[in-house]
Image (tube, grey):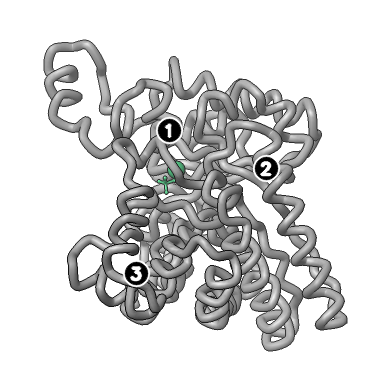
Amino acid sequence: QPELSGDFAAIMEWADQIRRMKVRTNAETPADARMARSFGAEGIGLCRTEHMFFDDDRIVAMREMILSDVEKDRRAALAKLLPMQRSDFAELFEIMAGLPVTIRLLDPPLHEFLPKSEEEVADVAKAMNVSAEKLRQRTEALHEFNPMLGHRGCRLAVSYPEIAEMQARAIFEAAVEAGKKTGSPVVPEIMVPLVGIMKELDFVKARIDEVAKAVMDETGTTIDYLVGTMIELPRAAIRAHVIAEAAEFFSFGTNDLTQTTFGISRDDASSFLETYRQKGIIEQDPFISLDLEGVGELVRMAADKGRGARPGIKLGICGEHGGDPASIHFCEEVGLDYVSCSPFRVPIARLAAAQASARKA
Ligand code: PEP
Ligand code: MG
């Protein structure tokens, strides 16, 4: 386990004394969560749950779930995943020992879950007891030309509410389990991705609240929890005052917000952005350092609108910019409560957040 030590650790402690913003980490594995804590992370700002379903023992069940057109069968596939998700979350809660943990509901581009080879089609067809031909047709029906602008995030939770319900149940049951084990109550933060329309959030939140009530009744335990959303679409920023009526926190997903504001693919852009930089059209790759004039303005506007509608709303950032010093200075200026970044960036984020506080003072 890497540790901060000696003079470096001392400098970090001085930095912490003047830092206002909290620094959390983006982590979904126990190893990353532990490493981030050893670097000083004060919680998890983004647990990307889609990464949890690619193991051999999970991907077939997930494919069954996505490819079945019968709700009962989808629920049966999800029932196989529930205990695994429960232990995923319980472990993260335990490692974070009472620090805040934000878990994001499933947000894959759907194609990542579809079977690709004949062998994968055959495996899932067998598990579902249908012909390979039927499964191929169903897979094709879900094909998208632009998956990153497609059936992902909360859109998936609207089409398949049972996924959100399974994940919410896993989160609440894990919170009860970890709370008992550690002796301090866990307050999970459940984050709904890719919201652009307030009713999307309303729809998903209603399911989460129902599950919370059921788990509280079953376990006889009170669970405090927050439901919030990512702000990662320009429409969400524009409608932030309305979305804040249903959201207890906002986390700025500046990777997608940059992609959708510029209309530039985050997965393909690097080569021409470098040309743009060389020719002086842009100063920085906006996927690395926040574009303050455009994307930043949307962040500022949404933060103001969110606070206007819900004073004290918790505000954070979990896009890659949360670990970029210049972007962190901007986050301080806008008054975010925390930044969240990959584990190895936690120390630099602590330092940058402290410098931003010092500059402001
Ligand atoms: C984002 O869009 O900024 C974000 C954090 O989510 P992801 O990178 O998983 O899309
Ligand atoms: Mg995103």
Q: Which x, y percent locates residue 39?
A: 42, 64
Mark 3 element type: loop
Identify whether 228 is placed above or below 132: above
Residue highlighted by disc 3:
54
Q: Check contact, mark 1 vs mark 2: CB within 8 A.
A: no
Please state, as top left, top right, bottom left or bottom right, where the C terminus lies in the image: top right
Specify whether residue 361 is in view: no
Crowdedness of circle 3 by 10 Å Cα count: few (<14), some, many (20+)?
A: few
Image position, residue 59 (x, y; %)? 36, 72
Judge from the rendering whether residue 270 lies leftward or rightward of residue 111; answer left or right: left
Q: Is residue 83 left or right of residue 198?
A: left
Q: Residue shown at 29%/31% (left/top)?
A: 265
Where residue 57 appears, as percent x and y from the top left, is 37, 81
Q: Is residue 249 left or right of residue 27?
A: right
Could you tell me which secondary element the residue under label 1 belongs to? helix
- The residue to which callout 1 is attached is 327
Residue linked to disc 2: 201
Along the line of sight, which residue is nearer the eye, 351 or 333? 333
